[in-house]
Image (cartoon, grey):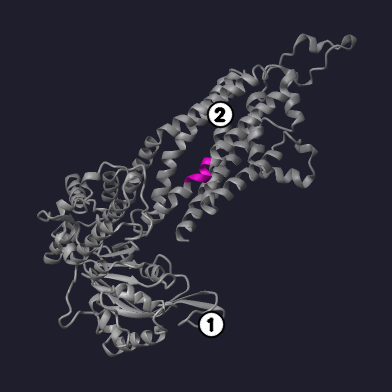
Amino acid sequence: MDIGAGAKEARPVRLPRASPIDIEFSGVSISVEGPGGLCSRSQNGKKLLLKNLNGRFQSGELTAIMGPSGAGKTTLLNVLTGFSTKGMSGCVRALGRVKSAHGSPLRKQSCYIMQDDRLMGHLTARESLELSAKLRLPRSVTAKERQLVIDDILETLGLAVSASVKCCSLSGGQKKRLSVALELVNNPPVIFLDEPTTGLDSSSSVQCMVLFKQLARGGRTVVMTLHQPSASLYMMLDHVYLLGKGGCCIYQGAPQMTVPYLATFGLLCPLYHSPADYMLEVATEDQGEYTKKMSDAVIADLGMNAGESKWRKAIGNIPDHPLPAARKASAVGKIWSGCQEEEQQIVLLPSEDDLRPVSELGKFRILLGRALWQIHCEWAVTQVRAVFHLMVGVLLGMLFSGASTDGGRTISNLGFLLVSLVYLSYTSMMPAVLRFPSELPVIQKELFNNWYSLISYYTAYLTAGTPVQMVHCLLFCSVAYFGSGQPNEPFRFFMYVLICELVMLRAEGLGLVLGTLVNPVNGTFLGALLTAVDLVFAGYIVLVSDMLQFFQWSSHLSYLRQGFEGVVVSVYGFSRETLGCPEEKNMISEGQGTYCHFRYPSKILETFHIKDDNYWLVDVPVLCMWVIFLRITLFFTLRWRMKS
């Protein structure tokens, strides 16, 4: 963040309209299987992670959920956001106008910025913001207004100087501020953050806290989890919600009231000791077992004050923000002082009558552009894969050169056809297994924060990626087919390529499904194992007629059987002329040479129990059904993974 720029005159930020929303919850509990905790009680073998939590987080305030490790900070945040509600009881309400002119629920008016910065590494900071703005700003916003929003946010968050830097090269503080910037585009009234200062140095932490304070001063409800902030960061907060062991709330109120509150229990914070550190020592029961007593006091306090804690506002002569003098004199201190003195200026764009969101078709086009740009950024990888396909095609062409026209080498040529299918299967399946695990966290964040729908992302991903895979397959098939001397007939080449493309798409589909269901290690193992099983039932290593009746029926489930039948028919079917054999191999007199049985293509098809009609009636339709089935399965497994 450009500290010097922060001291300049505040620049107005142009954002859409947003109505203030308060978050209120009561009786919130979370139970899981396991033994009970300190202030939780094991009931029917279940442990309460959160126990009877009540509270209210107001708009215009910076609220921090604090507590020791394992107290349930992130669990409570997940409940409030709706990210995870399994085993939950209680009620979470939004107070205020929680619906827009088009009936959008609260979840569509809030955002959740997770602890790990989930960003597309191949995009720059400006490109990421442009994508967010195109997807989330109303369709009535012009391109010029959209650029004004992007420029203002970059300037306000101190990202202008790093706007052209790719996300993977940003520092920790810059990534955190960019994560906030991406969600700030549509001015959400509620912002949730999970430990935003974790992993940052003190300077970056202060800069981020100043930013969050400014966002709260703009009328938003900003709720975050903090583990152990410094004294200066602690005093920047407006409201503290402290959890003790067992998921009980032991304090909720202003940070300035921490010391007086603890004094009511006989806990005196030592002079020059950070109230935040001392509060956590109390929460971990290093100062004694006060968790149950303080939890009961919080509940009683809320009951006597109509749900409002008497410690919420600083009273008396307690200083509002005892920032150290050295810090006040610094540039960060000047920014903080300016933040306290005046609210952030916001120009609202446009009126509520123009707040129609971008259509799903429009989002599809935007996501398609992102997917194509990602392929462009990974062009080196795409070129390497194309080169390897060409090299392997040349190698196979040289190894099996002339095998197609030599009746004495028919078995070798059939091996070439099967090797081609197996090569395409493995080279398309293995990258697919590793593809989704790397992108799932980003997709999950964007889907949860309502950037787009899953169907828009899914169709854009397939539309952009499938043609590239098909071009790679075509390159391999062209070199391998003609290099090995297969029949130079256009219709046979087309039939061969069609089967190879379908086999490749089927294998890629299985890899994508495995990538969404299991981790990459298990996915690659299962993919290789299933392909090996399909290879055994392809009908080349073991003839279908030699299998047991049960396995003959089971072989129909092998996509390599349909693929092998298809490529054999494309090369030897449809009344192909008799193959040639070397003259010496036809000399059976005087014990010289051998009988060239496979010089007749009809004998090849008869031996392997293959019919010409199977190509269009069985092989192509079955492979097409496999491709469609796996693409549909991928959508549902991806949706399940997003929800889990």
Instruction: Please tell me in which quadrant of the rendered image residue 88 appears.
Output: bottom left
Q: Say which of 187 and 616 sits in front.
A: 187
Q: Nearer the viewer, residue 66 or 567?
A: 66
For disc 1, the marked residue is 43
Instruction: Point out residue 296 in the picture as x, y percentages from the top left corner.
Output: 37, 87
Measure the alpha-carbon separation of dots 1 and 2.
63 Å
Q: In the rendered image, which quarter is residue 346 located in?
A: bottom left
Count numbered badges in the picture. Answer: 2
Going 62% across and 19% down the picture, which residue do you hit?
A: 398
> Can you say whether 71 is above or below 368 in the image?
below
The spot of residue 1 in percent (x, y) is 22, 52
What mark, if any, has residue 417 been given in the picture?
Answer: none
Q: Position of residue 110 (x, y in %)?
A: 30, 63
Give the label, 1 or 2, closer to the camera: 1
Classified by dominant secondary structure, the portion drawn in magenta counts as helix
Contact? badges 1 and 2 (CB < 8 Å): no
Dot 2 amino acid type:
Val
**Disc 1 crowd, CA 10 A, few/some/many (<14, 14-19, 20+):** few
Pick whichever of labels 1 and 2 is earlier in the sequence. Answer: 1
Mark 2 — residue?
Answer: 497
Judge by depth and name the residue closer to the eye, 224 or 385: 224
Is 214 included in the stretch rendered in magenta?
no
Residue lying furthest left in this view? 9
Which residue range is magenta in the image?
A: 431-435
